[in-house]
Image (cartoon, rainbow, N blue to C red):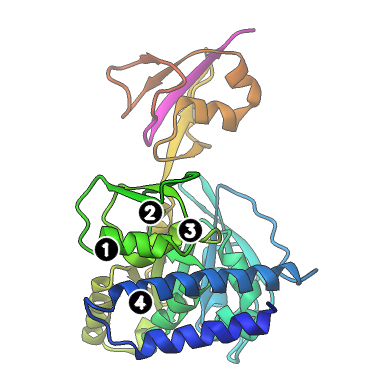
Amino acid sequence: MDTSDIEKQIKDIEDEIFNTQKNKATEHHIGKLKAKLARLRSEVDKRKSSGIKGKGFAIKKSGNATVGLIGFPSIGKSTLMNQLTDAESRVGDYEFTTLDVIPGMMKYKGAYIQIFDLPGLISGASKGKGRGKEILSAIRNVDLVLFMIDAQHENHLELMADELFKAGIRLNQNRPDVVVKRTGQGGINVTATTKLSHINEPLIKTIASEYVTNADIIVRENITEDQFIDVFIENRVYVPAIVIINKTDLISGSKLIQQIIRIKDKGWKVIPISAMESTGLNDLQELIYSELKFIRVYMKPVGKQTDFNEPLILKQGDTVESACKKLHREFKDKFRYATVSGPSAKHDVQKVGLEHHLKDEDILTIVITR
């Protein structure tokens, strides 16, 4: 079957889902249609991506994390980039000023955060409109997405989020806690370790039958049918995102407050700024840093003073072993013990092993064999 035939099937299924009344009697039918639709879309994406050679943006990642800044054309991204980073992003009052990826480096609390100013994202990007496929491919590889919207065009947020969803990018979600173990026989068996309110066992089996014949499925969280379908699709990525409302100087304070409340009610973290007037930028930097879940660890070499100028940047949940790997491979291979003082220590100076979890502003000494 060629791609055009699959795309016709996709259109037919989309129409059937749209025209089917949603109720208890039809939920299994719709669930199976959604599962088939996701599988066919994934197949089309695989075929199209395998046929594209030499396309895409050449992005060289550096620093402690990478952030993608996206928005509709002429939203003010270039102005913001020039305020936050060392980038020289061209600024203009016409659409598509940024025609390529513009990287810049923001230094904050000792962390080097690389920000990419991506070409304006527009409706239809997931179908390739306006370099959309290239932009979305770049977004799949960042650690945080910054949606930038004009205070006068709140609807742009939903349009952009929808394009990312269609491209398999899941924002502010974790990978569903579901285990699928394929078996040779016995059909599909489902075990739920928590109460399910959005999906039931028969619907799980209906959806799963589109992908597997025999499997043991363990569901460990209260997921939706869309989340369960995602378990079977390989190209899903999970990225945190925040919303920047720009040009706040162009609307009244009461309208801005109402807009912020509406966006927050939809589950977004949001921050108002004016890139042109340089307002709200410190709060934005702090939110970016917080969402990337960084911690600062100050190194104290044996017999020397603590270096408070250049902290080791790690992530929440990282251990002494993580620090060793980031510093030098030899540190783990020749590790004897470490000492920690600060928030993670039980007393002033605690002797710890590789498994010790570090916290922000710990002071760490690593002792190795010579």
Real-space Cα separation, disc 3 to disc 2, in angstroms:
11 Å
**Kind of residue indicated by mark 4:** Ile
Check disc 2 and give the amino acid type: Pro
Name the N-terminal-most of marks 3 and 2. 2
Instruction: Confirm or deny contact between disc 2 and disc 4 (CB under 8 A).
Output: no
| Earlier residue among tags 4 and 3 | 4
User: Magenta residues?
Assistant: 358-370
Give the residue drawn at x 53%, y 82%.
10
Classify 32 as above or below 125: above
Residue 268's place in the image compared with 16, above or below, is above
Q: Nearer the viewer, mark 2 or mark 4?
A: 4
Residue 62: image tag: none
Question: Would you say the residues marked 3 and 1 are in contact, meaning their CB atoms lie under 8 Å apart?
Answer: no
Q: Amino acid at mark 3?
A: Phe
| Inter-mark Cα distance, 3 to 1 | 16 Å
Residue depth check, mark 4 versus mark 3: number of the one nearer the observer: 4
Taking the view exactly as shown, the residue that stands out farthest to the right is 54
The residue singled out by tag 4 in the image is: 30
| Disc 3: which residue | 232
> For the residue carrying disc 2, how many other residues have a C-alpha within 10 Å: few (<14), some (14-19), or many (20+)?
some
Name the residue carrying label 2.
176
In front: label 3 or label 2: 3
Q: Position of residue 90 (x, y in %)?
A: 65, 78
Q: Residue 6: tell me if it is visible.
A: yes
> Which x, y percent locates residue 201?
27, 58
Residue behind mark 1:
199
- In screen coordinates, is 178 left or right of 138? left
